[in-house]
Image (cartoon, rainbow, N blue to C red):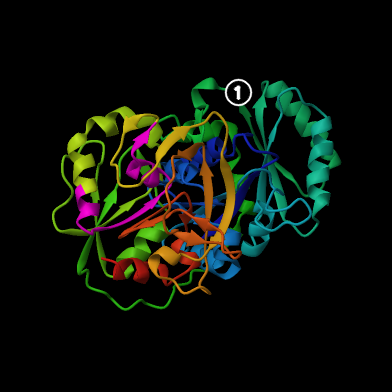
Amino acid sequence: MRAFVVAGTHSGVGKTTLTLALIAGLRGRGLRVRAFKVGPDFLDPMHLAAASGAECLNLDGWMLGRELCRARLQQAAAGCDVAVVEGMMGLYDGLRGDHEAGSTAEMAKWLGLPVVLLADAAGGARSLAATLLGFQRFDPALPLAGVVFNRIGGPGHLEYLRQAMTALDGIALLGGCPAEEALHLPERHLGLSLPAGTAPSAAWAEQHLDLNALLSLAAEVAPATLPARRAVRPSLRLGVARDEAFCFYYPDNLELLRAAGLELVEFSPLRDLALPEGVRGLYLGGGYPELHAAALSANAAMRAAVAGFAAAGGFIYAECGGLMYLSQALDRAPMAGVLPIEIAMQPRLQAIGYREVCPVGLGAPPELRARGHEFHYSRLVGDQPHAPAHQDAAGKPEGFHLNNVVASYIHLHFASCPLLPAMLRSRL
């Protein structure tokens, strides 16, 4: 398998659109493509999975560590021809301003992959060569192999940029993408909108990108497999909320739950009138409940079913959007009424960042740690005393543990704490 990383000079430069174009072009040549996303992201992987026809896994240095990220990529090599790893934010942006931890640059070096840098050329000319030189010299250990210019003004502009790049050594010009509104991926307050068929075509990619040069600079990745897991026959059913309102799940989390012996049964809080038959627990992931609050509220039968399930002692694990659905009301629209809070959406971001916690609500011992992230625009209103879902290293509580309900704003990555799936299963 050949592989490379797509990075940007900054956030919003168009990395996902370029990655989708590359996937389309490579698949148009009959190649099997697997996509990966650096960082704690749910929306970009949906786009990449839809384009590649395979699940997109997250490669997050802080949550998963070097060896697990490397293993994820090597496992994919057994079943595809090309792996495309989309970075996050700007190439060197990470946890701190004085260190590469958590950055796309760190991940590229961990994986041993060359970097294709996307730079915004709108309003730029020869000065862009100086920008690229700075990116190249900032970390000489990083294999910065090529550049694609976005929002070029036309063939003449691209030729000017080609001439400017003669001052650089070792960075190949891999194409220029014109500004086309039809290919712009619309954004919402949590990132990109859900996939809606706006991805570039294979013909567009062949026209604007040098796929031959790209494949020639991609690194080879030898296949590897993890030790075979002991087969566990599913014995308990776990209902997983899955629709437009609840769609933020790490594929790893679902796979680890299956490996723990759970049968995952999807249902829609938007459209279904009852919970799946025989479920012993519910997993309510994140998503966009705020965009569907009226429809969720109108489905009184499902709200009552969830409330009744909780009242009868059924186990519910909820993250972010799931927590919002379990509240009394979301912007005054009645929700399931399981938690003693209301939710109010805010115009500004209320929390963002990585989190490391002990999942005390799942019965974890104090020394156990799990990692995840938090990102939301809503806040809690009218909280009452309760036990927490999690505690950080300083003992600060977060989330709710009420009876057999564990709900939190934090999206945990189960691979950061392999005991989590078994702890969840034990509550069913």
| Residue that badge 1 annotates | 179
Q: Is residue 309 above or below residue 21?
A: below
The residue under the point 66% across, 51% down is: 115
Residue 396, quarter of the rendered image:
bottom right
The residue under the point 22% across, 34% down is: 299
Residue bounds of the magenta highlight: 308-330
Q: Is residue 222 left or right of residue 329?
A: right
In the rendered image, the residue lying farthest to the front is 385
Is residue 215 visible to us here?
Answer: no
Residue 329 counted in the magenta span:
yes
Q: Is residue 65 left or right of residue 80?
A: right
Quarter the C terminus occupies: bottom left
Where residue 314 sits: x, y (%)? 23, 58
Where residue 70 sits: x, y (%)? 56, 66
Q: Is residue 372 left or right of residue 228?
A: right
SS for dot 1: loop
- Depth check, front residue: 90 or 50: 90
- Depth check, front residue: 169 or 40: 40
Is residue 73 visible to us here?
Answer: yes
Where residue 388 sits: x, y (%)? 45, 58
- Depth check, front residue: 382 or 418: 382
